[in-house]
Amino acid sequence: MKKIAVIGAGVVGINCLLRLIDERDIDTELTWIYDSDVNIFGIGESTTPDLPSQIAHTTTLAVPHFKKYFDTTVKFGNKFIGWGKKHNFVRWLDPHSVGMHFDTKYFSEFFLDYLPKFTPNLTLRDESIKDIKFTHDGVYLSSSKSELYQQRFDFVIDCTGGKSLLNDNNYLDSILVTVNSVLALRLPETADWGCTISYAHQNGWMFGIPLQSRRTFGYAYNDNITTEEEALKDFRTIIPEALGYPYKKFKWTPRLSKYMVHHSGRYIRNGNAIGFIDPLESLAGMYYDYISNQICDYALTGNPHDQDLVNHLNDWYYETVVDDWYKNMAWIYHFGSKYDSPFWRNIVKDSKNLLNTKEIMNFSILNKDQNFTDDFYNIIANDPKLTQDFIYGKIHDYIGHDLPNFAGNYKDFVEWSYGMGADYADKFPLLAPHVDLNEVHGELTFDIRSIK
């Protein structure tokens, strides 16, 4: 009988717990540990389709329940305003899958009540973990309450958020530094735009989240370039209603863990405990979900003494999560925005440098004098055979390397390149993205459902 502890009652902790409940043998004992004195860290409150799909798969909940319990509105896509050089545009999710906007506090409160009632062999503990120790036969947690002290687990999954339980200095600073601060504001006005707003401003970008009871805006910026006073002043010019309402500042160090599975084989990280770069496009949630899939399977079936397996999982983390996250972030940012400001000049330059690093994007169709951002798609588009293979997903046979997510899928590539106004877009057949040519580039509008 395995004993697995999940620590943290935020979105990622719940996601991991749902996977374990769904995939375990019934005699596997689960312990869910959270600290009620720690506020849930949630600023984006927007998901990719992975989270609602996992909830629906593991529980009896459906969209009407999400709306009732989580203050949810359905997310059909992400609207980019002022990004790129030509158009505002919406990157729609696939029709068969949707994300959601939700209140993280309601989300956690619901599952803290729901899961212990309806889940066999699940124990809920309100504890503050003080220490973690390893022996040959397990991992031991100690807390401020004696009943948890010396309790043994086979695996501990750390989803605590900001400060990890173990080795909090064992991280790598992000090689791509975008924004590192958010001024978050909640306005008591209902909204249901159908999309998450991503609005480019001179110091970074702003997200807009529609909920049934309120709307939330987050002004994201880099405080090494822009002061909080400058950010707040600009924020209030974009959202004049912000004047008079309190805001909260969230700051983080863009970083990623040096490991996913500790060398003991028994301690595993996910969520903000494994790292965070930028709230853009819910990419963090997408990668946390990828990690959940891997680590839950490992906790249920893996052998902690199998060092080759531990190394394999960490290699997967570096290559699939870390590398992809960097490349996907760079892919979005390298298109720039309507602003020629210090933030945008820096991030476009850094993003292009990352994408054009041959060790990272080593494609066989590029010679030593060519690079990814300027030459790659021109080469494909100038060759009818390569263009056809790209459209039908066979391009990997020619380039010898996987593309990052947004560039590897032909539909997404065309949508992004046209939407962002990329120079090479007109060389490809136009599978037109949803662009309203009458809408002013960079003009903030919330009438999402009128887009044709």
Image (cartoon, rainbow, N blue to C red):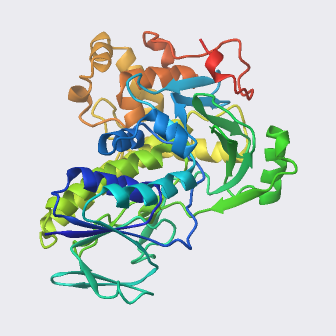
Residue located at (44% from left, 31% from top): 98
- Residue 316 shown left or right of residue 78 in the figure: left
Instruction: List x then y, in percent, for residue 306.
Output: 12, 69
Q: Is residue 140 above or below residue 216?
A: below
Task: Please identify the quarter of the rendering in which residue 217 is found.
Answer: top right
Quarter of the image for the C terminus: give it: top right
> Please, is residue 149 above or below residue 153 in the view?
below
Q: Which sits in the foreground, 315 or 5?
A: 5
Quarter of the image that includes the N terminus:
bottom left
- On the picture, is 321 further left or further right than 65? left
Q: Residue at x 53, y 37 (%)?
A: 67
* In this picture, residue 214 sits left or right of residue 433: right
Closest to the observer, 320 or 344: 320
Q: x, y percentage for residue 301?
A: 14, 60
The image shows residue 210, relative to residue 225, as above or below, that is above
Q: Position of residue 260 (x, y in %)?
A: 32, 63
Indicate whether 248 appears above or below 403: below
Examine the image and state in which quarter residue 133 appears: bottom left
Regarding residue 236, the answer to whether it shows in the image is yes
Residue 339: image location, x then y, percent? 72, 35
